[in-house]
Image (cartoon, grey):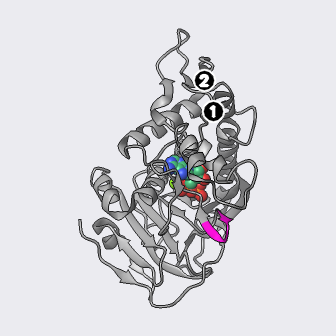
Amino acid sequence: MSYSKVSCQRRRSIRMVAWCLVLALAGCTRRQAPVTRQWLCMGTVAVVSTPRGQEAHLPRVHAIVSETFAEIEQNLSIFRPDSTLSVINTAAGSGTSVPLGVHAAATLALAYDAAAAGHGAFDPTIGPLMTLWGFRGTPRTQPPDEAEVTAARARVDWQAIRLDTSSNGNGMPVASLERTDMALDLGGIAKGYAVDCAFDRLRAAGESDFLINLGGNIRGHGRPGPARAGWRIGVRDPFHHDGMLGTVTLADGEGVATSGNYERFVELAGIRYAHIIDPRSGHPVRGMAGVTVIAPTAVQADVLSTTLFVLGTEEGSRLLEHSSGCHALWVTDETPPRLLPSPGFATRFVPSP
Ligand code: ADP
Ligand code: MG
């Protein structure tokens, strides 16, 4: 696979941006701009939009989406001790199988498949490494030493998830972790899953023109207005708070997600580390500023953006070739950054002038 390379000429300072702004609506005049509602959930900003002129739909769209997100957060958050995920983590290594509700069963199955497809570059048991590097629990000021990394890495193993989605005698799916001190962390998939779930409920409720954005995990249906081809999404410039690298227009029902190194990070001994960790080395990924993925669903875009951030362009492009309907843009963390779109992304991407 070959990549068209576009260099950004300006030196840009890295700035922290609100995650909700990583991908933003672009290209609307105020008269045409969709109407939106915004709130905080799942540790980020959620936004729903409907076309101007269809304002009457907005309260219902907001109610369905916000209820769905709250329900999923309740089940999957590692920050809630009573969530299904926390119960599985607490029971790790004990041999106890934890009964799963529909959301936990579906996300764990999707996460397991994503781990297998990416040969472990995506690993939902990344918890011990997230804690070691100070993204969870006690903050730290110095990077861990290699012996600590090796020890934590040994506790990260997606193949040690025991998942039975068929039965436990009652017909209820169950899951457990084989070893003590393992910990699930679904931060790389839960938001995309939640967007898809809300999308399906809106469609079932008869809504046809809307855009859902949960912290840069986006999926739309229909159009933002009568004279518009589809929802147009701005790909934010990771180096420039107000800048946009370009736009893509979503086909009906498509999802898009961005994984970046500039919103969630830790600074240890003066070096900034991204919140995406390569499970093979046990270290946060360096050298990549962001990866944006267009996919048939939001959850596919979410897992692929995290996976391709870890794999980089060479290994990542091989995975992408087997991911039907998925397209990616890698942005390197260098001066000037390089924009490396897959061929499919390049045909969809309209770079900013
Ligand atoms: P965001 O959560 O900011 O939208 P991502 O979708 O890229 O960004 O997910 C990053 C999150 O995924 C991390 O905060 C962590 O919870 C989890 N994570 C980090 N590294 C990995 C990995 N290699 N595989 C799976 N999940 C990961
Ligand atoms: Mg992701």
In the rendered image, residue 349, in percent from the top left (x then y), is placed at 38, 74
Mark 2 vs mark 1, CA separation in Å: 8 Å
What is the three-letter code of the residue carrying label 2?
A: Gly
The range drawn in magenta is: 265-272
The residue depicted at 54 percent of the width and 56 percent of the height is 276
**Quick one: which residue is furthest to the top in this view?**
169
Disc 1 residue crowd, few under 14, some 14–19, many 20+, Cα 10 Å: some
Q: Say which residue appears at 32% left-offset and 67% top-offset.
A: 342
For residue 240, side relative to residue 302 (left or right): right
Q: Main secondary structure of the magenta part?
A: strand
Q: Is residue 191 magenta?
A: no
Q: Is residue 352 left or right of residue 217?
A: left
Against 133, residue 77 (above or below) is above
Label 1 near label 2: C-beta < 8 Å?
A: yes
According to the picture, the residue beneath numbered tag 1 turns out to be 181
Instruction: Classify residue 351 as left or right of residue 176.
Output: left
Instruction: Check disc 1 and give the amino acid type.
Output: Asp
As for residue 269 lying within the magenta part, the answer is yes
Ranked by sequence position, the earlier of labels 2 and 1 is: 2
Query: How far across and down, in percent of the image, does residue 293 sit?
Result: 43, 61
Position of residue 240 relative to residue 275, above or below, is below
Depth check: give the residue in front, 225 or 107.
Answer: 107
Which quarter of the figure is the N terminus placed in?
bottom left
Residue carrying label 2: 93
Q: Quadrant of the C terminus?
A: bottom left
What residue lies at 40% left-to-right and 68% top-to-bottom? 329
* Residue at the (56%, 85%) spot, across then down: 12
Picture coordinates of residue 143, whole percent (x, y): 64, 59
Q: As displayed, is residue 225 above or below residue 305?
A: below
